[in-house]
Image: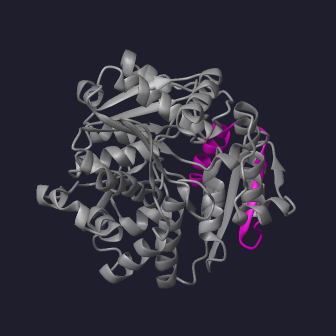
Amino acid sequence: MIYNSLNNKSEPAKFEEAVVRGIAPDRGLYFPEKIHRLPDSFFENIESKSIPDIAYDAIAPFLEGSIPELELKKIISETLDFEFPVIPIHDNIGTLELFQGPTLAFKDVGARFMARCLGYFNKENSSQKVTVLVATSGDTGGAVANGFLGVSGIEVVILYPKGKVSKVQEQQLTTLGQNITALEVNGTFDDCQDMVKTAFLDQEITTQKQLTSANSINVARWLPQMFYYFIAYRELKKHNKPLVISVPSGNFGNICAGLMAHQIGLPIDHFVASTNINDVVPDYLKTGVYKPIKSSPTISNAMDVGDPSNFIRILKIFGNNFENLKEMLSGYRYTDEETRVALKEIHQTSGYVADPHGAVGYLGLKDYLKNHPNKYGIFLETAHPVKFLDTVEETLDIKVEVPERLQETLSKTKKSIEINDYQGLKKFLIH
């Protein structure tokens, strides 16, 4: 499998090269040269297949020629070693819990998959140390830190916006030590993301360090997120109704992976991109004009993204055809006040405790189903509510039990380095 830059100014790359580079030399995102399609018979019998076997068949063609079959199956098995339960909420609405992994966030899957791929590649090139550079608006940092912790030959540098991630999220990315360093940026997530992209093009840095990114711009973080949608379909096929999936969306890597799953044959009927007030994509779906904005802070902070990197991949999937995209994707935006109301509604009607991102996903799904009552919908619950303890407890007037595996993290001492601008990052990386 060959990967091309979406800026079309760089040489094609194999999967291994695309993963290690993170982004192409022309600053473009990598995209596979061809998209395979699974046969209809695969989905007719999907209930009888194991989740690791389904995941292997879905992703293997994208890694062709880079990782042997047995090694890839081992990577998938280690990545998907926790549960992905579907919880009923109302008659035609459920939620898929993606937070049962080690850091209580959906990003555990992509981070663990990428860490194991990079670890495999690094065994072949053990003399070359790799620096993983990642920006986070919340959960990515903790998932990446956990996924790469102690991996030989790999250093991890995480940039996060000061005061704009939850206390739990900050503890998860600033307390691990070893090969993990957290840089606390005086700015927004978009500032952090821009610094990461700039570092990849800075020859003063790249001549001294082998950089790669663990954001969803990296193909090894992005593509394994397809697994969620196969898991959902496998569980919900029994309803025998068209399936709609609402995805709380920030950088649009997760929903982009869902749309890729659809491209290779997964029979999802429709996708809903649910955002907070950082509504670049819902606005685009109304106007046909893409207008990046300066991101604004909200209680669903992982979605505080004003220029989502992965949207260009979504446009590529649909051949930049606006009408085809609108047939498959709807977009809705919600305020913090509406999000709090949704948290209460979910809890009062079903007893379920959602997090703010899941609540936004619920709202988008509910609005879409108003006009499509004969479909079954799920929203993705992307993080455990304990990660947004203050918001959830204050809104619902309840106490959220802290999972045992998180209690030790919360008791550790935060260690971070504060930086103000790109020069601060550059100085750290070089010296």
Q: Is residue 317 above or below residue 337?
A: below
- Residue 132 lies in quadrant: bottom right
Residue 266 place in picture, x, y as percent: 24, 50
Please state the extent of the stretch shown in magenta in the rendering: 175-202
Q: Can the viewer see residue 431?
A: no
- The answer to which quarter of the image holds residue 220 is bottom left
Measuring 59% from the left and 22% from the top, which residue is drawn there? 338
| Residue 172 image offset from top left, x and y in percent | 72, 58
Q: Residue 57: percent from the left, percent from the top? A: 26, 66
Residue drawn where x is 40% and y is 54% of the image? 228
Out of 422 and 164, give the one closest to the viewer: 164
Residue 185 colored magenta? yes
Residue, x 82% and y 56% (percent of image)? 416
Q: Is residue 317 left or right of residue 184?
A: left
User: Residue 341, percent across and down?
Assistant: 61, 24
Task: Say which quarter of the image contains residue 246.
Answer: top left
Asked whether the viewer can see residue 317, the reply is: yes
Determine if the magenta segment contains residue 369: no
